[in-house]
Amino acid sequence: MIKRLFTILILLTFTGGIALVFAAGKKESTAGKSAYPPGMEKWLKEAKLGPYQEHPQNWKEIEAKAKEEGEVVVYSSSSRIAKVAGLFEKTYPGIKVKYFDLGSVKSVEKTVAEQKADLYNADIVTTGGSGQVIHKLLDNHMIVNFVPDTVGDRIPKKYKEPLLIRINEAIVFYYNTEAYSEPPIKNIWELTTPKWKGKVVTKDINASLSVFMGFATIVQHAKEMAEAYKRMTGKNIVLHDGVPDAGYEFVYRLLHNDLIILKSGGKVAAASGKRGQENPPISIIYFTYLRYNDSKKYANGVITPLDPVEKLVYPTYTAIARQAPHPNAAKLFTAFEMGSPKITKDTVIEPPYTKGKSAELLQGLAPYYDPGSASPRADVPKPRGGEIWDELKGWDVDPDFMWYEAPKLQDFWTQQAAK
Amino acid sequence: MNEAVRAKSTIITKLKYQLIRIRYRTDILLSLIFIVIFSFLVLFPLVKIIVNSLTYQDYDLRLVRNARLGAFTGYHYIRVFASSLSYSIFIKPFINSLLVGFGVTIVAMILGSLLAWVIVRTDIPWKRFFDSVIVIPYMMPSWVIALAWLIIFKNDRIAGEKGMFSYFFGITPPDWFSYGLFPIIVCLGLHYYSYSYLLISGALKTVNSELEEAGFIAGLKKSTVLRKITFPIVLPALGSSFVLTFTRSMGTFGTPALLGLPVRFFNLPTRIYASINSNNTGDAYVLALVLVVLAGITIYINSRIVGVRKSFVTMAGKGFRNRPNALGVWRYPLAFLIIFFLIIVFLLPLLLLLWDTFLLYPGDYSISNLTTHFWVGKSNFKIASGEPGIFRNPGIWNGVWNSVRLGVLAALINGFLGLFIGYAVVRNRGTRLSKSLEAVSFAPYVFPSIAMGAIYLGMFARPFGPIPALYGTFTLLVLIVVVKNMPFSSRSGISAMLQIDKSLEESAGIQGIPWFKRFRKIIFPLTASGFLSGMILTFITAMRELSLIILLVTPNTRVLTTMIFAYEDQEEIQHANGVTIILITLIVLANFIVRKFFGNKGLTGLKET
């Protein structure tokens, strides 16, 4: 019987395999915009999107049509989308939000898989993963950029083109404020010294695009990293064999300094932040987890000043999916995500942010209204304790670098982490 | 009449004959249908994964200039097996997988066979109690012991709170003891011994003492009897438990993920998971194939050595006695030793998990830190990020519902499919059709769970043949669990059918009673107990499944096991542990109810695999 099984397996494998190899081979653009796929032009016209947008946008009509559509389907990388959905349904009764909290990798994956199969389930795709979102989804017209004109002119150009950003977040460096009265390091390269061997914690880059983007952005700034090294040691950096530049060298030295890799951000924040530790590590993880200081009694503090960088900023985009079945509800949801146009620089917003008057003003921003996140809108005041966002010097994630260079970094990381 | 016309008419006649034959032979029709369905669900995925591993995937376009999506290439194989990355992607995880596989198998088989021998073949007290309790670890997810291990032996490498051991004794366990290979082998060994126990005790129960006594009378030494008579009889069971333990522990994901990462210990499953997560599907497919091939080789070697099919029965209608070996003074000490063992592998982990759910801050075992918040508390944003207590948590109840639904649906579908397959195989016994069906329904056995999840993810993310895009639906979870359990349920279906003589059904057939009625009135009642034991087995496996579905579950289709992992990730330790306890309670309860009301069949189904 076993023999039989193998014979069958082998036979089927070969015949099927060969047939499929020749059947495959569809060409697909991977860089740069391609032409509209069939059917898209018509949909854009009907949905008044892309080149067929009205100026100004007719929000009365959009809202009325959205109510007729009655539903909006959201693919999201953020678990807090559940709260956004709840607030939206309260504001617009009659429009149901069907959200899929998928994480960034699967949000992109699911969108791509469905679009390739001409299945149009999603209305909104809101996710991180800069390289993928711009060069995979946007370049291949799987999503469309839509900037609500209610707040559009209050958003700097780099945050609405080529694609609207709904929230900026960052990777930062935490120390335990209970164990250390002040930040224990001043230069990022100190993390690679024997003093911090086995005492730096981060999340597996294979499990988090955001953390990965953070490291990639450090690697991208090789020149600044080399200068920072010189400022610390007074000497020029000497690279290890096969390491291309000071950015990679930092990753190399960090990994070989017994960097502790954990599988979740929660664990990383806990590692540096839990109270009662004698010799707590430094962690490299999401800025927004500073909120655990409140909700879990952690003692994390952001390391500042830190040479050469203190925060690595990565965006969460929001876009309307191609052939979205509920385009008007999608527009309404996009506007909601960006917060009410009534907010100005001088608006006082009191906690709790997700309830009452504050929630009415913040709308979809409410669940993200914490010191570790920042609205792209220039006119939204910072939440309590949020001034620190502007004070930290940061580098922005570059979608092009993420798309073209990041896979190399991933391989480099995998290779060095195993040694 | 010329040649062509004659040939044509012969073909038509033959076809007509076959059609009529099928009309009256439901078993043939069933065989054909099942072979088509399973080829589609099992063999096609394998083909697909092979094809994908030989063509450029999305991710590769970013690494390889001039690569064209879907074009033929050996790139993945070179990358995995013969590049500067091979050491980290393949060689090290491969060695680790083998080490885990062998380590766990040795620990599990020694424990399992010793326990089986003591409980079946000696006069140890409380036999019945031991026999039913000792398999409880089988009902727990394999990584529960790993969770408990972390609670006790966590050291300051991953920082955060202290482990229980260092809290109470002030001694910090070394890294090799807390994380990596050693604890993985121990934790998995303490779970998988139950497989060996079930299989080996089943075989031992069928060994007639007279065979051994005959040996003694012939003047053989005790060791010779053991070596020459007892051992060969249980050899097939030993072989089966080797294959089962080795292939499963090599392909397991949960425990290595919990205990491995802090010391960068990757095995093939965790490497596959990492590759899939970073969208690098090419690597994942090749590694998944490595696991499939490894499992295939293991099964092949086993079939060579043992030389017989897996179900091996020595029971006959003749006088049968099981004369236990006398333990003498060791009777009670040994019994207490077993009780102590059970406490360590079953009670202690559960109690620790339970204790942890009552701690306000994990790692602080003082009285003042006790709370019932995590069970009955309302959402409080100062604790656990506002996650409400377990009994007030609609998300968890939804998970309970999904888990139970998955378990019951899979059990029902597998139970019936197993019966039908058993019927089709047994009625056609000896024919090529029957053999093919048996082989195809056994094929999912070679797929390590995580690899199968990876394959199904790729296959059902978009519409596939007549099937719509199933990714993100509950149906997909049911489908994969059913297919993965097919080898077990078809085996129990076949052995149940073997007990029924053809003549029973034939006599009804002659009276013109239609097939469906014959099946319902004659065959089903006669096989009901085998059917039930197969179902409870599937239910247990489905309820505690993680590796298989971790890649396929989305927040809307969360089941308890994936929720436990998610809570664990979010460092909501109390919630993770509480949900684990709920899950185990549900499984044990279901098993208890089935045993209570439908006879003492319980887990015996595994023996038929």
Image: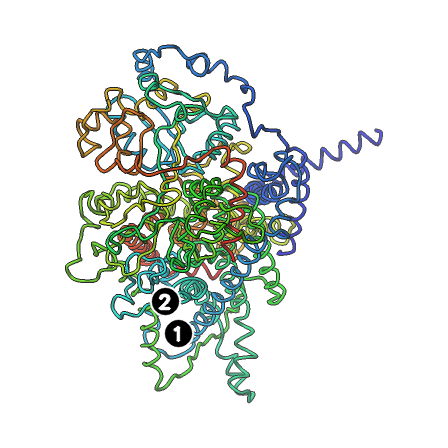
* Residue sitting nearer the eye, B204 or B398: B398
Q: Residue at x 34, y 71 (%)?
A: B341
* Residue sitting nearer the eye, B72 or B209: B72
Q: On the image, which quarter does residue B132 sit in?
A: bottom left
Q: Tell me, for residue B119, which label it has, or none.
A: 1
- Say if mark 2 contacts mark 1, CB within 8 Å: yes
Residue sitting at the far bottom: B219
Q: On the image, which quarter does residue B39 sit in?
A: top right
Residue A33, percent across and down?
A: 54, 23
Q: Residues within 10 Å of mark 1 (few under 14, many from 20)?
A: many
Q: Is B276 left or right of A371, judged from the image as shown?
A: right
* Residue sitting nearer the eye, A288 or B403: A288
- The answer to whether residue B528 shows anywhere in this view is no
What secondary structure is marked by label 2? loop
Q: Residue at x 42, y 27 (%)?
A: A122
Q: Amino acid at mark 2?
A: Ile
Are labels 2 and 1 on one chain?
yes
Residue B566, percent across and down?
A: 35, 47
Residue A312, percent across and down?
A: 39, 39
| Residue on which the image places disc 2 | B134
Measured along the vertical axis of the image, is residue A416 above or below residue B302?
above
Between marks 2 and 1 in the image, the one whose residue lies nearer the viewer = 2
Host chain of mark 1: B
Q: Quadrant of the N terminus of chain B?
A: top right
What secondary structure is marked by label 1? helix
Q: Amino acid at mark 1?
A: Ile
Earlier sequence position, callout 2 versus callout 1: 1
Residue sitting at the far front: A234
* Residue sitting nearer the eye, B45 or B378: B378
- The answer to whether residue B378 shows anywhere in this view is yes
Q: On the image, which quarter does residue B347 sit in?
A: bottom left
